[in-house]
Amino acid sequence: MDFLDYGICYFVTYASKVNGNISRFVRPSRGIRQEDPLYPYLFPLCSNGLSSLLSQAVIRKDITSVKISRCCPRDSCLLFANDTLLFHKATVKESQNIFSILQNYEACSG
């Protein structure tokens, strides 16, 4: 059974160890920031979701992927470190589709 069936929500908590003593648990109140030690692990996981949404949009022909050179495959985004570059045709319809994808991604990822 899934924990969401019960309406239970698990939150991240942190504790630090100073001079061998473990501090009380602290629940972050501002979300995860780039300085957070978990950030390098979470960005690839979350960006994979965005990449999948963009790939599905290319398959549905909602957005057009770009080919950088003859030797490269077509692509709609580049993900590097904590930066994301999106590529599409400069039309109002494709910009609206990208905006819709980003709203969907925001709703899913928080």
Image (tube, rainbow, N blue to C red):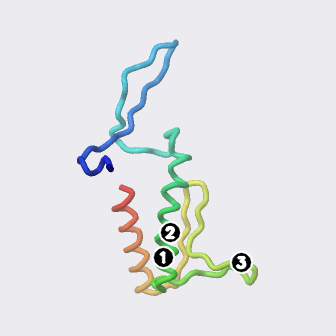
Q: Amino acid at mark 1?
A: Gln
Q: Residues within 10 Å of mark 1 (few under 14, many from 20)?
A: few
Secondary structure of residue under mark 2: helix
Q: Amino acid at mark 2?
A: Ser
The residue pinned by badge 2 equals: 52
The residue pinned by badge 3 equals: 72
CB atoms of marks 1 and 2 within 8 Å: yes
Rounded to the nearest whole Å, what is the CA distance between mark 1 and mark 2? 6 Å
Left or right, 107 with respect to 68, comes to left
Q: Residue at x 38, y 38 (%)?
A: 12
Rounded to the nearest whole Å, what is the CA distance between mark 3 and mark 2? 19 Å
Rounded to the nearest whole Å, what is the CA distance between mark 1 and mark 3? 20 Å
Badge number at residue 83: none
Q: Residue at x 29, y 50 (%)?
A: 4
Q: Residues within 10 Å of mark 3 (few under 14, many from 20)?
A: few
On screen, 73 above or below 34? below
CB atoms of marks 1 and 3 within 8 Å: no
Q: Residue at x 60, y 81 (%)?
A: 66
Q: Amino acid at mark 3?
A: Cys
Where on the picture, by quarter, is residue 110? Answer: bottom left
Where on the picture, by quarter, is residue 107? Answer: bottom left
Which callout, 1 or 3, points at the residue further toward the start of the chain? 1
On screen, 54 above or below 4? below
Secondary structure of residue under mark 3: loop
Secondary structure of residue under mark 1: helix
Q: Residues within 10 Å of mark 2 (few under 14, many from 20)?
A: few
Badge number at residue 56: 1
Q: Residue furthest right?
A: 71
